[in-house]
Image (cartoon, rainbow, N blue to C red):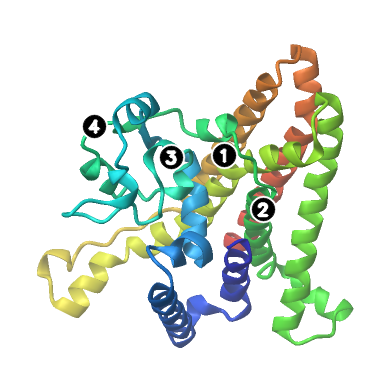
Amino acid sequence: MAGAVLFIIWFETATGIRDSPFTLGVLLSIMLASAILVAVIYERQSWCHYLCGLGGVAGVLAKTSIVELRADRNVCISQCGSNECFLGTTANEGCPFGQAGPRLHSNRLCTLCGTCVKNCPHGAINLNLRVPGSEIWEIRHTNAGTAFLVIGMIGGLFSEMVSKMPFYGSISMVLPLSPIPRFTVVFIAVLVAMNVMLVLAAQVSSRIYGERFRENYSRHGLALLPLALTAFMAFHIYYLVNLGVQLPTLLSHNFDFAVFRGLIVTVPPEVTRFIQLTLIYVGLAWSLIIMYRLGRASREKNLKIVAGLLPHAALALFLALLLLEATRSFFYP
């Protein structure tokens, strides 16, 4: 799934898909055919759960959500022996992701469809509010692949913005390749460089905390998820603001809606830039808070927590500054 996510990020920029409706149509057709084929062979939503890049991104970002569906395990253990949440009932099928209520521990495995809530005869499954990002510092099952995906998402977004910066043209002098192979080399180089920085930070931090390297890498790599989320929001907010304000004009021209004919909305670049800056700074602060909570979970003294936090905090700050500069150069050359 991580490979599918990174492939889509690479494919968008390498093929200029935003300016090519035909290429976008081909990609969506391939994804649709693949989803149908997997659904024919495997049960439930196997395509979304294991293979789909878009489903993978949505699932990982859902870890930062303010809501969650969780089961009261005491009720499940003491009162339930039929597992309707997983197996289903005569009226409804079971969980599309194949999850049993008591086992559900991550929003990545849940689309909030509510099937389990409808099926549970004991009312053990509830929709809860939670602190955004709390799942990351409370997670029990660490996964290095998810951490790699998060740093890869940041690297992929940065690569796309780098490809439109003025100095990118000079890279052709060093790499005399056609556009797609040249971008591919840059894309891979950025992913490797960012992952190496995360590895080095985890190496130092794990020694200070006295924990396994893989666990430190997995947890603190995932702690960068809020920064990845807000960076993607900052990137796409430009298109949302500048294209969204054109909708009244398009409606009046194409559908002859007189009410929109004189409605012209403009958004100053300073406003868009302020929103982008705010989003990235919020993501940085959010990630730093999660890193601190991870340090507190180690039950070390405050001085040791700060020492173990510093390598990852420095990396998060460096990535935030890169993203700030990249968005400025990409949108406001």
Whichever of callouts 3 and 2 sits on the residue coming sooner in the sequence is 3
Q: CA distance from mark 3 to mark 2?
A: 20 Å
Circle 4: element type: loop
Dot 4 crowding, Cα within 10 Å, few <14, some 14–19, many 20+:
some
Amino acid type of the residue tagged 4 in the rendering: Gly
Q: Quadrant of residue 188?
A: bottom right
In this view, 207 is above or below 188: above
Dot 3 crowding, Cα within 10 Å, few <14, some 14–19, many 20+:
some
Residue hosting label 1: 283
- Residue depth check, mark 1 versus mark 4: number of the one nearer the observer: 4
**x and y percent of residue 184 in the render?**
73, 75
Circle 2: element type: helix
Q: Pointers 3 and 2 in contact (CB under 8 A)?
A: no
In this view, 312 is above or below 289: below
**x and y percent of residue 242 in the render?**
41, 61
Circle 1: element type: helix
Amino acid type of the residue tagged 2 in the rendering: Gly
Residue hosting label 2: 145
- Residue depth check, mark 3 versus mark 4: number of the one nearer the observer: 4
Residue hosting label 3: 65
**x and y percent of residue 4 in the render?**
58, 68
In this view, 232 is above or below 126: below
